[in-house]
Amino acid sequence: MGTDSYFHLQLNDNENPLVQSEVPWQGPFHVSYNAQQNVVTLNHAFFEQLYKAVFGPKQPLAKKPKPYRISTLLTMAFGEWKVVRDVVLEKVQDCNDTQYVYLLNLLDGLVPLAYYFYSVIFRSGNFYLYMEFLQHFALIFICQRR
């Protein structure tokens, strides 16, 4: 079976060790929501500054924002990062400061991963890509002790 086959075809492939060894405990929507929630709550200071820049300095961001606010914040961060990414990377390409490296990892890795997982990766029907992203989430959750 090709890598672009759909879930119902791949789940019946009993000879595939990937299918036999990896069964997610949660559904894809909850994995996606937990990842989005983790990204925003663990980087609260960054997202609070983003929130205040857009909605005004008197608007505080809750410690545990509502799902629609999490989605809005990720969309804002992802969209604006796409606009300024090339300029920022050009200016800080030789910088090894951990704060810049962490910020680049957040904006170039974690935010797109959380943003695209359910709407693009899961709904694409590509089982192998879905499992690869679940492995990325597992590593992120382990690192964040979630």
Image: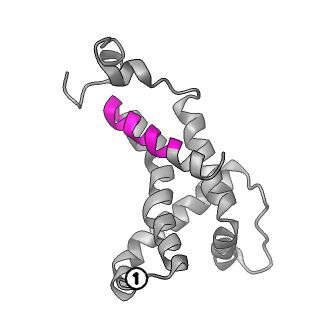
Whether 24 is among the magenta residues is no
- 52 sits to left or right of 58: left
Which residue position holds label 1?
A: 88
Q: Quadrant of the N terminus?
A: top left
Q: How is the image coloured?
A: one colour
Query: Up-down: is 104 above or below 90?
Result: above
For residue 117, say whether it is visible: yes
Part of the protein shown in magenta:
124-138
For residue 126, say whether it is visible: no
Whether 137 is among the magenta residues is yes
Circle 1 sits in a helix, a strand or a loop, which is it?
Answer: helix
Query: Up-down: is 4 above or below 51?
Result: above
Among the 4 quarters of the image, the one containing residue 52 = bottom right
- 12 sits to left or right of 61: left
Identity of the residue drawn at 67% across and 60% down: 42
Residue 48 in the image, given as x and y percentages of width and height: 70, 71
